[in-house]
Amino acid sequence: MEQRYLGRSGLRVSRTALGTMTWGRDTDADEAATQLMAFADAGGTLVDTADVYSEGEAERILGGLLGEIVPRDELVLATKAVARRTEGPFGGGASRGALLSALDGSLRRIGVDHVDLWQLHAWDANVPVEETLSAVDHAITSGKVRYAGISNYSGWQLATAAMTPSTHPLISTQVEYSLLERGIEREVAPAAQHHGLGLLPWAPLGRGVLTAKYRNGTPADSRGASAHFAGYVEQHRNDRAARIVQAVATAAEGLGTSALCVALAWVRDRPGVVAPVVGARDTNQLLASLETEQLTLPPAIRAALDDVSAIELGYPERPMP
């Protein structure tokens, strides 16, 4: 698998990342082990998790697989903090105390002495950004974190964090980005490129809708039929999405590949993107995503997909005439 540098840093990661949001809920430890092995065998290195995925179980499962399935030093481990885990004073948020407490918990659950990429899961309006970034600096200086990034920040929030004096610059931002969700192109993506942050798209398959499996209903084994993911998927099931999915399916038929591969290749090779984060319920889904490594979209097809999924840019994102 091709390796790319993450943002303006020397950290190299695989251009597809393995997401673990379903681990410990829809994906048990045995299935997670098979996924991790398949991902590593394909040359994948970047594994993304978070302290709140399945209430910490995703991190625990990942930790149990290190060494046994894949050596620790062959993976780039990424986790997140800020989201609320408990109601205690240090159970969430971006204060110095909460962040460092969350980091210690993540290291304990994964069973490692450091993570390679520590991400702030959301902006916290109640905490001065200087305090938040001082915790990040301390985490890196202490050796518990190698690099830091952000997630789900708006354009102005990203710019504010990037321009706040800090010893260790942020190198990445993880945001939703797909043919169905291109809103980051208004401000977030340009800000990230300007400040040297690599893009890590989550939900690159439009929360599963771009695989075309929902065109004729809701498969019983899909996330759309799951009690805790149905609303997550439903957000991208509308008339606009149907037109885009049809275009993706047509392109896939012409190329002799799957709609999944077309949609994933489109976002993987967008400007500023380093590695889409692919979450799979089972290994077959993951293997289908890994087939994208062999695909580069022809310019004509890429242009057609750009057109059918285009978003309207208004003032001031759109240049004045």
Image: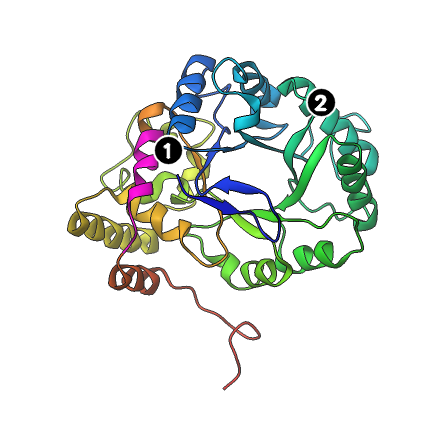
Residue placed under numbered mark 1 in the picture: 224
Query: From the viewer's perspective, is residue 76 above or below residue 196?
Result: above
Give how far apart the Cα atoms at labels 1 and 2 are: 32 Å
Which range of residues does the magenta coloring cover?
286-297
Q: Is 64 in front, or is 245?
A: 64
Q: Position of residue 93 (x, y in %)?
A: 74, 37
| Residue 279 seen in the current view | yes
Residue placed under numbered mark 2 in the picture: 105
Q: Position of residue 6 (x, y in %)?
A: 56, 47
Identify which residue is drawn at 78% across, 27% down: 101
Query: From the viewer's perspective, is residue 275 above or below residue 35?
Result: below
Give, as a three-letter code, the residue at label 1: Gly
Q: Is residue 201 left or right of residue 99?
A: left
Q: SS at mark 1?
A: helix
Magenta segment main secondary structure:
helix
Give, as a three-letter code, the residue at label 2: Gly
Any magenta on residue 176? Answer: no
Q: Position of residue 13 (x, y in %)?
A: 51, 40
State which quadrant residue 12 falls in: top right
Q: SS at mark 2?
A: helix
Identify which residue is drawn at 61% across, 22% down: 55
Q: Earlier in the sequence, mark 1 or mark 2?
A: 2
Q: Nearer the viewer, mark 1 or mark 2?
A: 2
Identify which residue is drawn at 44% across, 23% down: 36
Any magenta on residue 294? Answer: yes
